[in-house]
Image (cartoon, helix red, strand yellow):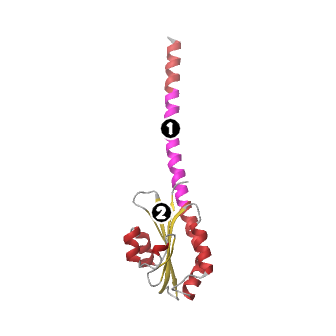
Amino acid sequence: MKPKLTVMWLIWFVAACAYSYAIAGFYFQHLFKATFDKRLQEDMVKLVQTYKPGLAKGLQKKPEVMTMDELDIIDSLAKDKMVTQVAYFNKFGKVRWHRQASLIGLEIKDYEKSMGRSEALWEALNTKTSKIRGTPDQQYYDIAVPFYTGAANKDLLGALWLQVTKKY
């Protein structure tokens, strides 16, 4: 009778260990994913914030056309492996830069008809702060950064909208 009892306790012990390992693995996997997502959001906003003075300067200097400095900045953002879409708007609500050249010069309304609406962009323009929103399919983040000038951030210079992938 003793060997059966020992085997039974061993089976229960192994089952309890397997269960606790499964629960811990599930918990840490979700914890890691949430930490990575938050870090990705913060890193992308910091990256845009470092380029913000150069972009704002170009928007003030020539609101209609891009300067070479702006083009270099936007091009480096567009080449980032995590960034899937970039749209750069001027204060008149027109697309200043996009990967698809046919979209350059479109009004925001026409741009949204062809590419879809971004709630993050509209919230950023209304609140005058950077906004990050997940897309409905939860595979991407929409990051919108408005550029304002003046003492109370009254004058809109333009906005930058990025779509960043969550895939790592």
Identify the residue position indicated by label 1 in the image. 22
Amino acid at dot 1: Ala
* Residue 157 percent coordinates (x, y): 50, 84
For residue 112, which quarter of the picture?
bottom left
Instruction: Name which residue lies at 52% across and 58% down.
Output: 37
Name the side, left or right, on which 51 lies relative to 145: right
Q: What is the crowding at mark 1: few (fewer than 14 residues within 10 Å), some, or many (at least 20)?
A: few
Does the stretch in magenta take in 18?
Answer: yes
Secondary structure under tag 2 reads strand
Q: Residue furthest front?
A: 102
The disc placed on residue 141 is 2
Secondary structure under tag 1 reads helix
Name the side, left or right, on which 120 lies relative to 41: left
Q: Main secondary structure of the magenta part?
A: helix
For residue 36, which quarter of the picture?
bottom right
Tell which of 1 and 46 is nearer to you.
46
Q: Earlier in the sequence, mark 1 or mark 2?
A: 1
Residue 86 higher or lower than 69, as above or below: above
Residue 144 higher or lower than 57, as above or below: above
Closer to viewer: mark 1 or mark 2 = 2
Amino acid at dot 2: Tyr
Q: In the rendered picture of this protein, how many numbered marks are placed on residues?
A: 2
Looking at the rendering, the stretch of residues picked out in magenta corresponds to: 13-38
Instruction: Name which residue lies at 51% across and 55% down.
Output: 34
Q: What is the crowding at mark 2: few (fewer than 14 residues within 10 Å), some, or many (at least 20)?
A: many
Does the stretch in magenta take in 159?
Answer: no
Does the residue at mark 1 contact the one at mark 2 (Cβ under 8 Å)?
A: no
Q: Residue furthest top?
A: 1
| One can see residue 117 in this view | no
Tell which of 21 and 56 is nearer to you.
56
The disc placed on residue 164 is none
Distance, label 1 to label 2, CA atoms, is: 30 Å
